[in-house]
Amino acid sequence: MSALAQDTCLMGTLSLSILFAALAGPAFAQPAGKPACAAEAVEAARKLLKLHTDADDRASVDAASLRGIGTVKALVGGKPLDVVEVEGHVYKANYRIRLIYARIPGTCALMGQEILERSNPY
């Protein structure tokens, strides 16, 4: 991969991380209740966690922790995308998993995903 492509990829990842940090505030909180794609989100989160942990059999997702945390603007088209968050666990490690879905009636179109370990690396 060229240096320019790596820089572009890094900037996109950094921008997405900053955007997700901004979503953590209460101004973006959605009303209580299950998001439209709750069952699909739990399964997608489980798959992402297993991918991230080299298919560790101890990987699990806490379906009860699933919640809608707001919306983000689509990169193309500008329409809103729904963001849901769920907690995952593997052995002694805990993870925050966020999934981004397009608002297309009758479908659950996964547009993006993020996984972060909840730990202090320092």
Image (cartoon, rainbow, N blue to C red):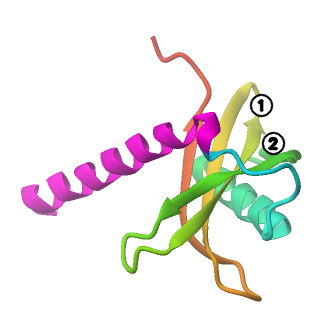
Give whichever of 74, 65 is nearer the camera.
74
Q: Residue at x 32, y 44 (%)?
A: 14
Callout 2 touching callout 1 (CB < 8 Å): yes
Vertically, is 111 above or below 5?
A: below
Query: Image point 36% across, 77% down: which residue?
Result: 76
Q: Main secondary structure of the magenta part?
A: helix
Find residue 89 and report its horizontal and vertical position in percent. Answer: 76, 37
Image point (57%, 46%), residue name: 115
The residue at the far front in this view is 27
The amino acid sitting under disc 2 is Arg
Q: Which residue is mark 2?
A: 58
Residue 91, disc: 1
Q: Is 17 situated left or right of 72 in this image?
A: left
Residue in view at x 77 percent, y 45 percent: 59
User: Around disc 2, counting alpha carbons within 10 Å, would you say few (fewer than 14), some (14 to 19), or many (20 or more)?
Assistant: few
Query: Label 2 to label 1, Cα distance in Å?
Result: 6 Å
Give the structural element (helix, strand or loop) at label 2.
Answer: loop
13 is within the stretch colored magenta: yes
User: Does residue 13 lie above or below 21 as drawn?
Assistant: below
Q: Secondary structure at mark 1?
A: loop
Stretch of the chain drawn in magenta: 1-27
Placement of the C terminus among the 4 image quadrants: top left
Tell which of 24 and 50 is nearer to you: 24
Magenta stretch containing residue 87, yes or no? no
Q: How many marks?
A: 2
Rendered location of residue 84, percent (x, y): 69, 55
Amino acid at dot 1: Tyr
Nearer the N terminus, badge 2 or badge 1?
2
Q: Position of residue 75 (x, y in %)?
A: 37, 70
Q: Quadrant of the N terminus?
A: bottom left
Quadrant in the rendering for residue 113: bottom right
